[in-house]
Image (cartoon, rainbow, N blue to C red):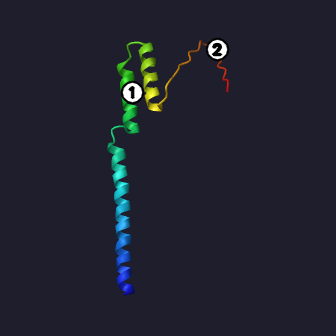
Amino acid sequence: MFQTYLQFVGIAITNAQLMETSQAEYERNRALTHPRSSRQKLLEVVHDLFEEQTSLENVVLKTLQRAQRLLKCERAAVMLLEDGSEVRHNV
């Protein structure tokens, strides 16, 4: 009787290992094929920047818009400095 029980335990352990392997493979494949992967987002940003090279204003605007979407924030800002000026951080 004990030996029969051990056989079922062995089958359960094997099934659990197969399930874990299957889930890991699924997650790996999903990360590679997911349309919004980090690699895909970076490619979209680069594409947008090359597409909007008509003026510096358009590049900055497109960059800010993409940053807002990626960071899920309401606002974004760019600080322009003249040569030789210092940046003061207020924390």
The foreground one among 23 and 83 is: 23
Image location (x, y in percent) of residue 80: 56, 15
Q: Which mark is residue 46?
A: 1
Mark 2 element type: loop
- Taking the spot 43% from the left edge, 23% from the top edge, the residue there is 65
C-beta proximity under 8 Å, tags 1 and 2: no
Above or below, 65 relative to 27: above
- Please tell me in which quadrant of the rendered image residue 88 appears: top right
Mark 1 crowdedness (10 Å alpha carbons): few <14, some 14-19, many ≥20: few
The answer to which of marks 1 and 2 sits earlier in the sequence is: 1
Image location (x, y in percent) of residue 71: 48, 31
- Please tell me in which quadrant of the rendered image residue 41 appears: top left
Image location (x, y in percent) of residue 76: 51, 23
Which amino acid type corresponds to the residue marked 2 in the rendered image? Ser
Q: How many marks?
A: 2
- Taking the spot 64% from the left edge, 19% from the top edge, the residue there is 87
Which amino acid type corresponds to the residue marked 1 in the rendered image? Val
Q: Which residue is mark 2?
A: 85
- Taking the spot 38% from the left edge, 71% from the top edge, the residue there is 13
Mark 1 element type: helix
Above or below, 78 relative to 39: above
Q: CA distance from mark 1 to mark 2?
A: 30 Å
Report the quarter where the N terminus lies: bottom left
